[in-house]
Amino acid sequence: MSQNSFSAAQIGWDAYYQARELNTVPWYTEQMDQDFAALLAKYGKSAKTILDLGTGPGTTAIALARLGYQVTACDISPFIIEVAKQRAGDFAEAIDWRVDNIIHTSLSGPFELIHDRGLFHVLKEKLRPVYVEQVGRLLKPNGILFLKTFSKQEPGDWGPYRFDIDELKDYFSKYFGVLEWQDTEIPSTKEKDPKALVAVLQRTG
């Protein structure tokens, strides 16, 4: 991705968030997803450093900071990063906030855990292998990626791309093994939460 493309994406996401109330953004929630909380308790007890990719309003990053993790929270939109900081209140200073794009990242890591709730599934097909390379580089050996995407079980073709577990395995097999996966939903502001897939991927080597 060129720097011009990065800037265009920043402008687009800034405009998106500025044009609507936060509680009308489809993926907005007040609390960390329950399925992720359970997986974090299972796989993240001994970890300290965690990257929240595409943090958006910062809900997960703030919850993680409250739990005592050393959190880096990044998003392509400078506007939503400022919103997230305000929402964090007393925990704002405990979080390393970054305006960043994982495809053209300035992050260096390494992190023990990475959380992605809905970033990978909005990437264009040609950018998905780049994401895998970048996340693989940012994770420590044996580090964990928690990945949540739209599922092929969600009807229609609106919104993000839909995955099944076999397709995720194909994309990530170069650097990751699948420890666990679940059919789930993405909590949202919509009348019905979309069907999703959450995978726990471990960095190999």
Image (tube, grey):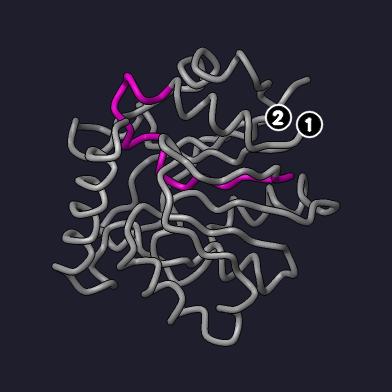
Residue 129 vs 111, above or below: the answer is above
- Which residue is found at the position 55% from the left and 53% from the top? 52
CA separation in Å, label 1 and label 2: 6 Å
141 inside magenta stretch: no
Residue 91 vs 130, above or below: the answer is below
Depth check: give the residue in front, 36 or 85: 85
- Quadrant containing the N terminus in the rendered view: top left
Point out the residue furthest to the front here. 3
- Which residue is found at the position 40% from the left and 42% from the top? 119
Give amino acid for label 1: Asn
Q: Which residue is mark 1?
A: 142
Q: Residues within 10 Å of mark 1 (few under 14, many from 20)?
A: some
123 inside magenta stretch: yes
- Which residue is found at the position 67% from the left and 53% from the top? 50
Name the N-terminal-most of marks 1 and 2.
Answer: 1
Q: Under tag 2, what secondary structure?
A: strand
In this picture, which residue range is highlighted in magenta? 111-128
**Which x, y percent locates residue 189?**
29, 63
**Which x, y percent locates residue 11?**
20, 54
Q: Residues within 10 Å of mark 2 (few under 14, many from 20)?
A: many
**Which x, y percent locates residue 149?**
42, 37
**Which x, y percent locates residue 78?**
34, 63
- Quadrant containing the C terminus in the rendered view: top right
Q: Which residue is mark 2?
A: 202
6 sits left or right of 178 in the view: left
Query: Do the residues under discs 1 and 2 have CB atoms within 8 angstroms?
Result: yes
Give amino acid for label 2: Gln
